[in-house]
Structures are given as C-alpha cells and as structure tokens.
C-alpha cells in the first residue's frame, strides 16, 4: 500500500515532526505507521489532522503508467 502522507504534508507546508506533534505521538511512531501498515484509525487521525478525506492519503494508480513486474521500473504510455 502506497501512502501519500509525506507528499500531502509537503503540499500543506507541514513536516512529519509537526504532524506527529499535532497527533500527540512520537515522530518515530508516525514514520513507522506511514512506512508500514497503519490502521484505519491511524489513517483517519492523520486525515483529520491534515483536514482532508482519508482517500487522499492513498496513492492513486496512474492509468498511463506500466510497471515492469521484473524490475519495478515505471514506464509512461504515450
């Protein structure tokens, strides 16, 4: 599962450390959650704190991108 938490934070001019402070958790715990397998509850808290729908935290699949199953390289279809 690819999350956009870091990308969204950058767009909203907030650091991961600041987000962790607003969530009342340690920065290390937040990093582990967003780089691992966070619970829906955690994602909901992050989304609420960033003032956006939870669905915005998930990377949307690009319809014009193909990923090589062998090496993982992304190719854009034109």
Image (cartoon, rainbow, N blue to C red):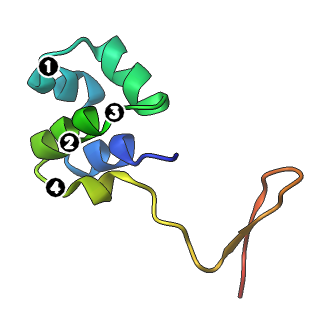
Q: Which of disc 3 and disc 2 is earlier in sequence?
A: 3
> How far apart are the two marked residues, 2 and 3, measured between alpha carbons?
9 Å
Q: Which of disc 1 and disc 3 is earlier in sequence?
A: 1
> How far apart are the two marked residues, 2 and 1, measured between alpha carbons?
16 Å
Residue at (14, 25) in percent of width and height: 23
Do the CB atoms of the residues marked 1 and 4 lie less than 8 Å apart? no
Viewer-proximal residue, 71 or 41? Answer: 41
Q: Which of disc 4 and disc 1 is earlier in sequence?
A: 1
Name the residue that disc number 3 marks. Answer: 39
Q: Residue 31 occupies which quadrant of the picture? A: top left
Q: Residue 26 occupies which quadrant of the picture? A: top left
Asked if residue 12 is positioned above or below residue 77 in the image, the reply reads above
Viewer-proximal residue, 14 or 30? Answer: 30
Query: Disc number at residue 10?
Result: none
Name the residue that disc number 2 marks. Answer: 44
Which residue is situated farthest in the front direction here?
40
Residue 76 in the figure: left or right of residue 39: right
- Residue 20, horizontal then vertical, whole percent: 21, 22
- Residue 40, horizontal then vertical, whole percent: 29, 39
Asked if residue 32 is positioned above or below residue 45 in the image, the reply reads above
Q: Which of disc 3 and disc 4 is earlier in sequence?
A: 3
Name the residue that disc number 4 marks. Answer: 52
Which label sits in the foreground, 1 or 4? 4
> How far apart are the two marked residues, 4 and 3, measured between alpha carbons?
17 Å
> How far apart are the two marked residues, 3 and 1, measured between alpha carbons?
19 Å
Q: Secondary structure at mark 4?
A: loop
- Residue 1, horizontal then vertical, whole percent: 52, 46
Which label sits in the foreground, 2 or 1? 2
Residue 50 in the figure: left or right of residue 32: left
């Amino acid at each position: 599962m690819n999350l956009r938490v870091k990308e969204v934070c950058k767009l909203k001019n907030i650091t991961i450390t600041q987000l962790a402070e607003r969530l009342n958790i340690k920065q290390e715990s937040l990093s582990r959650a967003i780089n691992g397998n966070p619970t829906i509850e955690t994602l909901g808290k992050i989304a609420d704190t960033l003032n956006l729908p939870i669905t915005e935290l998930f990377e949307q699949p690009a319809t014009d991108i193909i990923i090589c199953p062998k090496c993982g390289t992304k190719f854009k279809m034109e």
